[in-house]
Amino acid sequence: MAKKISNKFWFQLHGWFSLPIWLLFCFICITGTISVFSHELTWLTNPDSRAHNPSQVSEMSAGSVLRAFKDEHPSADVMGLNVREPYLTYVVMFTDVDKPYALAYVNQYTGAVQEINDGNTFINFMRSLHGWLLFPWQNGYSVGYYLVAFMSLILLGALITGLVVYKKFWLAFFQFKLRKSQGDRTLAADIHKLSGVWSLWFMAVMSLTGLWYLTQAVLWHAGVELEHHETLNAANIPNSTINTNAVETSVDLALAEIQQQYSDFRPSYIMLPEHNRDTLKISGANDYVLYDDYSINIAYNTWNDTVVHHANPDSMTGLQTVMHITDPLHYGTIGGIWTKVIWFIFGCILSGMSVTGFIMYQLRTKRARSQARSNARQLKAQQG
């Protein structure tokens, strides 16, 4: 009797972890699944984002791309440069007299500015929708970010209780069972169980990476700095209020110095100095397995063109390591297009599981109500 009660308890708990917020969870899964192909969808939906190379020339340096943009928009105040896939243009982030914030798509093979937008692109919209449900950010945090990250606990709870409820789940790896002739409820249950078993690893990855995002939100909210931010002191700055060194030249010099140490270094993000005591910051990656595209970071003094700080995976703290491996695991970028395809497929499966779970709940509730009405009629007949 105790065992039956225990099984019923775990089954109900599994339902509570899965069902009350099934619609929101399904929505987050779908938007995240679409975001897996963010770069590919950008290329597909926006011709101006494509880095055409008709003359088959070598790629321009990052400094040359910045110069080409400044030549065309001399009044712009450039904040940084984002380097994406080779088939996509570089993205220059800037402000101007009529633009409080804007992005410029600059072709790294021709130097042409192919588009200027305000950042409200399709993929930015999808990632914001997935990451924080478009809730506003105030004082360094967003309620939507917390809500999405909290789903990791729901998913982890559903995973654990599902394993407890589904006895000998490993048999599903060898027995492909879909009972189509025993009613909708049985078919939905079979699809739900089969999808769950084959998605165990994916649910574990999503729940654990989501748990880190929740932890990261708490740390951000508490003002904890996870990354090192280097600024210059008076000894590093000459007795001048104007830096005569061109920042575009410093960008190329800094990249050349990094590539001497990492021959296959790929820059991802370049942030220009915001003020005289600020540094030029360059982030990128090379062949470190599992780490994101921002795992190698340098801070560069543009006054005398020297490196003042250097960090890579070998020098990271435990929290920094987790932070830099979470995104590739969450979005499936660890192995290029093929792992993206796998993540997309299992993202669709996970989205479908929330639907089949809801169908099972609806059918079970309908059956329970029908049974209750039948029992009531029988009791009334007996009393009459």
Image: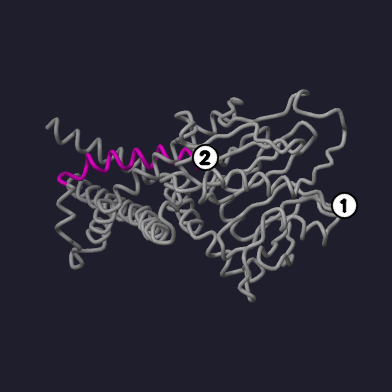
Q: Is 210 a magenta residue?
A: no
Q: Residue visible at 34% across and 49% down? A: 202
Viewer-nearest residue: 137 or 100: 100
Q: Nearer the viewer, residue 36 or 153?
A: 36
Q: x and y percent of residue 118 in the render?
A: 73, 56
Q: Amino acid at mark 1?
A: Val
Q: Please, which residue is most extreme toward the left here?
A: 1
Magenta span: 147-168
230 above or below 366? Answer: above
- Residue 57 position in % (x across, y down): 63, 70
Label 2 neighbour load within 10 Å: few <14, some 14-19, many 20+:
some
Colouring method of the image: one colour
Write the residue at 72% across / 57% down.
Answer: 64
Q: Magenta stretch: dominant SS?
A: helix
Give residue 269's position: percent from left, percent from top: 62, 48
Answer with the quarter of the image where residue 181 lies: bottom left
Q: Is residue 146 left or right of residue 25?
A: right
The amino acid on which the numbered mark 2 sits, given as a three-letter code, is Leu
Badge 1 density bin: few <14, some 14–19, many ≥20, Cα 10 Å: few
- Residue that label 1 marks: 97
Q: Nearer the viewer, residue 112 or 360?
A: 112
The residue that label 2 is drawn on is 147
Q: What's the mark number on residue 273?
A: none
Quadrant assignment for the N terminus: top left
Label 1 vs label 2: CA separation? 37 Å
Residue 370 seen anywhere in this rendered image of the structure: no
Q: Is residue 162 found inside the magenta-colored segment of the image?
A: yes
Q: Of circles 1 and 2, which is in front?
A: 1
Q: Is residue 136 visible?
A: yes
